[in-house]
Amino acid sequence: MALVCIVAALNCASVGYDQSMMSSLNILTAFQTRFGLDANLRGLLTAAQNLGGIVTGFFAGIVVDRYGRRGGILIASLLVLLACVLHATATTKAQFFVGRILVGVAKSVDIAAVPTYLVEMAPPKRRGLVAGLYWACWLLGAIISSGVGYGARSVGGNWSWRIICIVMAAPALGCILSLFFIPESPRWLISRNREQEALNVLAKFHGKGDQSNPLVVAEYREIKESISFEQDNKFETFKAWWKAFVAKKSNLYRAYILLTLGVFEQTVGSSIISYYLADVLKLAGVTSEREQFTINIGQNCVAFASALIGICLIDKVGRLKMLVAGSAFCAAVLACMAGLTAAQTGNPAGRSGIIAMVFLFQMGYSSTWTPLSFSYCAEVLNFTIRAKGMGFYSVFTSAAGFFNQYLIPLGLKGIGWRFYIVGVCWNVFMATVIGITYLETKGLTLEQIDKRFEGVPRDQLVDVIEAFDGGKPISEKELVGVPVATEAEQVQVPVPKEIKG
């Protein structure tokens, strides 16, 4: 499982590098001079990657379902390499803009592939930790990027920003090389009539190599029954699938979570710090490039450490408590930033207080939202719609991200510290919606979560090992494949047996 996590870390780091890269580029005077950037154009170039995510999200899940979770990871990494070339060799705003869009395409495929892969590979009791590692390692890329930016600023001229763009290729190359050493998702293998391979993977990662382990046996039967039942009820056309999909209350609930969480994840306030730290610091009176880069590196390191702490708490505390607490904490920090920026930027103590708020915000956001914003969505989707649902989730996050990232520099320039007050009110609203309307998934298998969405109360389900005869070894007959899914979409349908966790 460690190697699986490393591959996910490298993959997410290649995407996470981009976010801090833009923060570094927005600090550099050489980059702003080369492309003649003002607040409007800076916002457009930063937000442009979301345009690629919006378009690609509609079919990213289909690609991941067809070529496998590993195939999706490979495609995302290759796209990052191509985007790296466009960024590093850009001589016009148009070329750089295309490179930004391509990063968004890669990010959308990445979101459909990696969280899906992690939640399908992880043991139920450690799924929060493993899946949470995905977006936590986005910060690993951010640390690398901010560190490269700090060193590259001394080079001067156009090479100062081109070097930053070139290094974006490193995590993607590491991910591609590591793919040869990890297996495919057992759920995807079963859906492709590769039962023995799936059983081997489950035994290796969930049963220490023992194929007769009760948990492995029960999970194998649970997964196979669920996928077989869904494939027996497939639809031949997308129109028929969509009609059946929206007719189910459980699927509409899932869609509601994807839509709202996608918007919330982009608007909780992290984009202000991640993409426009320079604007925040200038508003606070910190104008030195060296100081800004130093703070950028420091806040990314704090964020990464906080995210690692957060992923260790997910399976103990629960998803909803962490999201609600994180939103409330971020609201409080933004309120403090508003007050300090309004009244205390004229003295050193006030500027130090604002810088402290930047670090506190990252601690609160990174320990809660960072590990959960993508893993929670992957959990609430069932196998048939998981990759496609994550693709649609990237559409929502990209659409909200484009609006948010384009608006931030204009808002900070137009209304200054009052822009933080908008964030305070919004975060309080977010915390209320999540706490009241979302479903807790702590401690359940993916198939158990499926049953919860069908309306079965948590205390009325039976134990998974008991329900699927975990003590009885798997027979030769059970390794016979189920019918292979067609390319037509499928709708989630209830699994006959009750499952409990």
Image: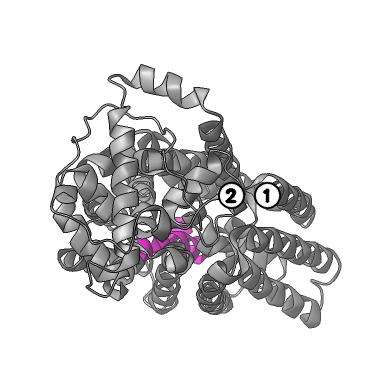
What colouring does the structure picture have?
one colour
Quarter residue 481 falls in: top left
Q: Position of residue 127 (x, y in %)?
A: 44, 64
The residue located at (37%, 62%) in the rendering is: 12
Is residue 29 covered in magenta? yes
Residue segment shown in magenta? 12-34
Q: Position of residue 265 (x, y in %)?
A: 58, 51
What's the residue type where badge 2 is placed?
Gln
The residue located at (45%, 77%) in the rendering is: 150
| Vertical relation: 326 (above or below) 80 | below
Alpha-carbon distance for marks 2 and 1? 24 Å
In this view, the residue in front, 223 or 213, is 213
- Asked if the residues shown at circle 2 and circle 1 are in contact, with their CB atoms under 8 angstroms apart, the answer is no
Q: Earlier in the sequence, mark 2 or mark 1?
A: 1
Q: Residues within 10 Å of mark 1 (few under 14, many from 20)?
A: some
Residue receiving disc 1:
434
What's the residue type where badge 1 is placed?
Ile
Under circle 2, the secondary element is: helix
